[in-house]
Amino acid sequence: MSLRVLGSRVIPFLSKRNGRLLCSVAASSASKESLSSPSPESDVSSTKQGWSFLKFALAGTLTGATAAACYATYAYSLDEIEEKTKPLRESVKYSAGENATALDKFQQLLYTTAMTVPAKAIELYLDARRLVEEQVQSYTEPYSDKLLPDLLPQEQHVFTLVLDLNETLIHYIWTRDTGWQTFKRPGVDAFLEHLAQFYEIVVYTDEQNMFVDPVLDRLDTKHCIRYRLSRPATKYQDGKHYRDLSKLNRDPRKVLYLSGHALESCLQQENCVPIKAWQQKDREDTVLLDLIPFLEFVARSSPADIRPVLASYQGCDIPSEFIRRSKEHQRRMQGQKRGFWKH
């Protein structure tokens, strides 16, 4: 076989073999490239996973902080939290000192940096809670610890008669035809005029000023009532407005609170004079007039503490019981006089 014929047969065979080799080399290099360099989709998915983890971490941190703040608000008062967190908040101001080593200063720097965020968070919580409690207190507590001005020196012996308004001195109703109507309790004019000679009279109600002032202007034309206290002066507790006699700036031993709802509306029940609640339908009511003798006797006799006196009348109709005791006292005194003259 000639060399020309052999060459013509070998060249096509090598070209075919080289083609297969080139294809296999190209495929292997492509597979290596695909393994060594990630695709754009994998970059996007890994980025999304990182952001998701960060979001979950932030959400968990906020949830934990909120839960801790809610528990602290429920379990501890503001003063207690300030006292408990004081060391942590002051640790941020810690200084390693001039003679400290470089390592100590570096550790102090790391500690201060790490504790700055928790300390600032606690400071923000305390400021926010203090602001909220002040706002709440402005609605739930009387507007002042001294609702009345000081008594004059010459009036230190005078008792204070605190009166409720609705269903005690007046009663108001509303109808579609007539609107609001206010009715005076029978005997209220004589009651106020007579007892103003002996008492410092104060009206203490849970009604609003816009209602109280016009009503008392018409009711008290002779200015027997010295002071008027309305809803802002009450204590809001358990969904009700209570009269807090401890805020009156008066000796509690010389304060009487008279109301048709005395035991339900006053925090100091030992100072209460409960009477029957009045409505405009009861035209024959005489409760206020019946109480005048008892209240005048208290003012004239001036007991050292009115609270034991009122406790002795607990569960009794005060006017009737006072008359019974007065008659019994007179009989006893007459008996003692007879005994004296017999001897």
Image (cartoon, grey):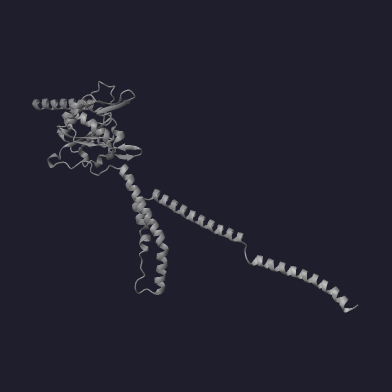
Q: Which residue lies furthest to the top in this view?
A: 284
Name the spot of residue 154 as percent of width and height, x first: 12, 40
Residue at the image point whose x is 89% and y is 78% from the top: 2
Q: Where residue 328 sits: x, y (%)?
A: 18, 26
**Residue positioned 58% across, 59% down in the render:** 44
Q: Is residue 13 above or below residue 152?
A: below
Q: In the image shown, does 160 or 1 lie closer to the viewer?
A: 1
Q: Give the total number of marks visible in the rendering.
A: 0
Choose top left, top right, bottom left or bottom right for residue 335: top left
Q: Is 18 placed left or right of 70 in the picture?
A: right
Q: Quadrant of residue 330?
A: top left
Residue 285 point in image, percent of width and height: 25, 23
For image coordinates 34% across by 47% down, the residue present is 133
Task: Say above or below: 270 vs 125.
Answer: above
Q: Which of 283 and 326 is in front in this view?
A: 283
Q: Residue at x 63, y 66 (%)?
A: 37
Write down the quadrant of residue 196 in the picture: top left
Q: Please indicate, yes or no, whether residue 125 appears anywhere in the rendered image.
A: yes
